[in-house]
Image: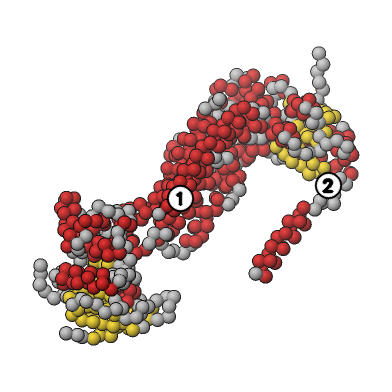
């Protein structure tokens, strides 16, 4: 596991078509957990989508270390599937027609044998304490279980950046606390930039907290 | 009873539907994913056969694919026989009337897939083609299947377009519906009734199947 | 809400308005496709003379006869084959049969090297269209002609069927068929190849009265007997028919 400090640099402007406000983000996300707070509707999910390449912003620049993902001036735009990102959605977005194991296997590159990929997937599920649901379909799982699987799946691709969009927002406080504590160690151990979106407090060890207000991101450094 | 018209109808409908699945799913994907000038116009043109009188469509086909048209002469040059008055013509006639059904059904089935599922697949490194094949099509399969069965039934029963273009040649292009029409006109009521009953039973079976497939999700 | 009510009232109004009977009921004449062009001329002349409007419905003779058997209400049926007329009379669906002439079967073709029916097999005619012999008199005549000349088996793989003489002609006009057997009376300007009358059974055209107690129908049937009508029919290849009595 390489120990250098990764840096995700974001500087973008984007106007959401149906709503009148503009998203303006200027921030650097380094290895470790960056918590992104803000009220609902402030544009946090949109920003994550922009970073993931799901939405192409009007102008700006996004790069990870020396790899440019997006540059409006130079007309560069690398598609989502080539950015090597892990993304945990608020609603998990697990594939309903695959069982949990195959959901995770889907993200593992086909550079190893089938059995190795299955083993790798099982290891990820075990890490998330969800190996016991491996052969069940997502629809049979509880809220906590689906998000565990979703996180395991997001890690399948050995991502260079991990994005989490309020993954535990639909849960009660005790479950939320428990899950946050569980994943804290795992995602810190990845040694990659992680952006964790929430509009509550969180129990994660954050290396920086930034707040988005009406589409604008301001920096607050907490050590 | 003369078995040929029935056999020919099934053959024609089967071939027509096979082509329609390929074109229909591809066109539906194109329409739902891309944005280009004239897209809505293309959509209207592709849907038009559902609302046009069949004889009008048949007449257009006769002009566009006839032996003196650009397409018709080329085809005859390559394959040695024309489109009109052959089983090819009967297949195309059957395709035109039922392709819109598959396009609409597929497009509709694709559009209700949660976009985040597609986005999740992309983040996991899947190219748009891989996502389409492994995620979108499987999730849309019941909509595609139901519309395919409807399209097959419609191909089976096509009359107006086939009448204009196929030449009603016994054993070659005289499909069941043409046969029934002829039988009624010449007073052969037994032949007509028998074939009508068979086609009706088949049609009901298809509708039953379609309903079963479409409604299986209601139980959840 | 107001818009919805207005639209509904408008639709109801239009529906009721179209249900009203038109002040003058035209004469409904079912005409075999093969003689439709000729009868159109008759219609113009008759209307000019009497002021009575005629509405023409065309189809193959067998198709129209079948419709009448199913209850279609035509005033007069002008068949291209007397057997259909006879059949209706036998079923008490029609009366007053009048033979208005016998038809002429002709061959039309775009191939220059074909001068007669016998030239067909050796020519490069790819498709010949005939009306469906099962219910169209000219199709039946064409079939009988070709059988009589021993050509049917040789060329039957080149034959396509139109559901009536009009569609047969259309196959030719759209250049999909290189040749077609049609009635002389459906052609207006096309060049045709004549066929000897004795090579096929006479196509006897008969008209019958289908609606009873109708003054206008009787007037038209009388008109058919007039010299003017016979002249018009003659110009379209429908010549007087004299039954050869044994």
Residue B129, given in percent of the width and then of the height, sits at 32, 56
Count neighbours of disc 2 (C-alpha within 10 A) and say few if under 14, some if 14 to 19, many if 20 or more.
Answer: few
C123 left or right of A133 in image: right
Q: Is residue B199 above or below residue B119?
A: above
Q: Nearer the viewer, mark 2 or mark 1?
A: 1
Residue occupying the point 60% across, 31% down: B193
C49 left or right of A68 in image: right
Q: Chain letter for mark 2, please.
A: C
Task: Report, in whole angstroms, how far the alpha carbon at label 2 lies from the one at label 1.
Answer: 53 Å
Residue occupying the point 43% across, 49% down: B216
Q: Is residue A4 above or below residue C216?
A: below
Does residue B139 appear in this view?
yes
Q: Nearer the viewer, residue C148 or B148?
A: B148
- Scheme by which the image is coloured: secondary structure
Residue closest to the far front: A174
- In the rendered structure, find residue C25 and report the number of the disc placed on it: 2
Q: Chain letter for mark 1, please.
A: B
Q: The C terminus of chain C is located in which quarter?
A: top right
Q: Nearer the viewer, residue C120 or B19?
A: B19
Residue occupying the point 48% across, 47% down: B211
B154 left or right of A132 in image: right
Residue occupying the point 26% across, 79% down: A201
Image quadrant in which you'd find residue C65: top right
Q: Which residue is mark 1?
A: B215
Q: Secondary structure at mark 2?
A: loop
Residue C44, given in percent of the width and then of the height, sits at 82, 44
Residue closest to the far top: C246
Residues at marks 2 and 1 on the same chain:
no
Q: Secondary structure at mark 1?
A: helix
Count neighbours of disc 1 (C-alpha within 10 A) and say few if under 14, some if 14 to 19, many if 20 or more.
Answer: few
């Amino acid at each position: 596991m390489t120990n250098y400090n990764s840096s995700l640099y974001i500087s973008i402007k984007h106007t959401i078509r149906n709503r009148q406000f503009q998203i303006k983000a200027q921030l650097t996300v380094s290895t470790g957990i960056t918590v992104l707070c803000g009220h609902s509707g402030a544009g946090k999910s949109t920003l994550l989508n922009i970073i993931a390449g799901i939405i192409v912003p009007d102008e700006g620049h996004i790069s990870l270390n020396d790899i440019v993902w997006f540059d409006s001036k130079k007309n560069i735009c690398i598609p989502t599937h080539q950015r090597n990102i892990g993304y945990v959605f608020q609603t998990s977005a697990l594939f309903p027609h695959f069982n949990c194991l195959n959901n995770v296997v889907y993200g593992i590159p086909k550079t190893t044998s089938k059995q190795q990929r299955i083993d790798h997937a099982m290891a990820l599920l075990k890490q998330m304490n969800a190996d016991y649901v491996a052969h069940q379909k997502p629809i049979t799982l509880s809220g906590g279980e689906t998000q565990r699987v979703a996180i395991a799946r997001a890690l399948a691709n050995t991502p260079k950046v991990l994005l989490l969009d309020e993954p535990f927002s639909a849960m009660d406080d005790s479950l939320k606390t428990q899950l946050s504590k569980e994943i804290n160690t795992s995602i810190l151990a990845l040694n990659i930039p992680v952006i964790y979106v929430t509009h509550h407090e969180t129990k994660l060890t954050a290396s920086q907290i930034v707040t988005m207000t009406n589409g604008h991101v301001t920096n607050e450094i907490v050590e | 009873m003369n078995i040929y018209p029935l056999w020919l109808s099934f053959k024609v409908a089967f071939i027509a539907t096979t082509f329609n699945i390929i074109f229909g799913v591809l066109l539906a994907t194109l329409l739902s994913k891309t944005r280009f000038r004239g897209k809505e116009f293309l959509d209207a043109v592709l849907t038009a056969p559902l609302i046009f009188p069949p004889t009008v469509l048949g007449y257009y086909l006769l002009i566009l694919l006839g032996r003196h048209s650009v397409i018709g002469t080329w085809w005859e040059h390559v394959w040695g026989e024309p489109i009109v008055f052959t089983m090819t013509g009967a297949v195309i006639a059957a395709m035109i009337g039922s392709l819109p059904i598959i396009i609409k059904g597929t497009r509709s089935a694709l559009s209700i897939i949660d976009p985040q599922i597609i986005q999740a697949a992309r983040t996991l490194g899947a190219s748009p083609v891989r996502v389409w094949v492994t995620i979108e099509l499987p999730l849309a399969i019941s909509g595609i299947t139901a519309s395919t069965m409807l399209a097959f039934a419609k191909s089976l029963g096509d009359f107006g377009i086939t009448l204009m273009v196929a030449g009603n040649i016994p054993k070659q292009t005289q499909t069941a519906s043409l046969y029934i029409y002829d039988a009624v006109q010449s007073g052969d009521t037994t032949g007509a009734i028998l074939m009508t009953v068979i086609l009706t039973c088949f049609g009901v079976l298809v509708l039953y199947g379609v309903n079963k497939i479409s409604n299986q999700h209601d139980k959840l | 809400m107001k818009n919805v009510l207005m639209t509904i009232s408008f639709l109801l109004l239009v529906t009721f308005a179209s249900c009203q009977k038109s002040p003058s009921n035209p004469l409904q004449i079912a005409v075999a496709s093969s003689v439709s062009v000729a009868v159109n001329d008759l219609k113009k002349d008759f209307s000019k003379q009497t002021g009575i409007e005629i509405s023409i419905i065309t189809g193959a003779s067998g198709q129209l006869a079948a419709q009448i058997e199913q209850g279609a209400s035509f005033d007069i049926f002008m068949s291209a084959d007397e057997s259909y007329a006879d059949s209706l009379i036998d079923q008490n669906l029609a009366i007053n049969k009048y033979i208005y002439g016998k038809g002429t079967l002709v061959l039309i073709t775009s191939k220059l090297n074909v001068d007669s029916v016998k030239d067909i097999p050796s020519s490069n005619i790819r498709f010949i269209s005939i009306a469906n012999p099962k219910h169209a008199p000219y199709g039946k005549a064409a079939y009988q002609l070709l059988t009589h000349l021993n050509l049917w088996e040789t060329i039957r793989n080149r034959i396509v069927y139109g559901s009536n003489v009009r569609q047969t002609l259309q196959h030719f006009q759209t250049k999909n068929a290189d040749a077609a057997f049609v009635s002389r009376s459906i052609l207006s300007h096309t060049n045709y190849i004549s066929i000897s009358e004795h090579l096929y059974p006479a196509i006897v055209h008969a008209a019958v009265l289908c609606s009873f107690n109708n003054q206008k129908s009787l007037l038209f049937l009388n008109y058919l007997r007039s010299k003017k009508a016979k002249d018009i029919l003659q110009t379209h290849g429908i010549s007087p028919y004299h039954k050869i009595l044994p």
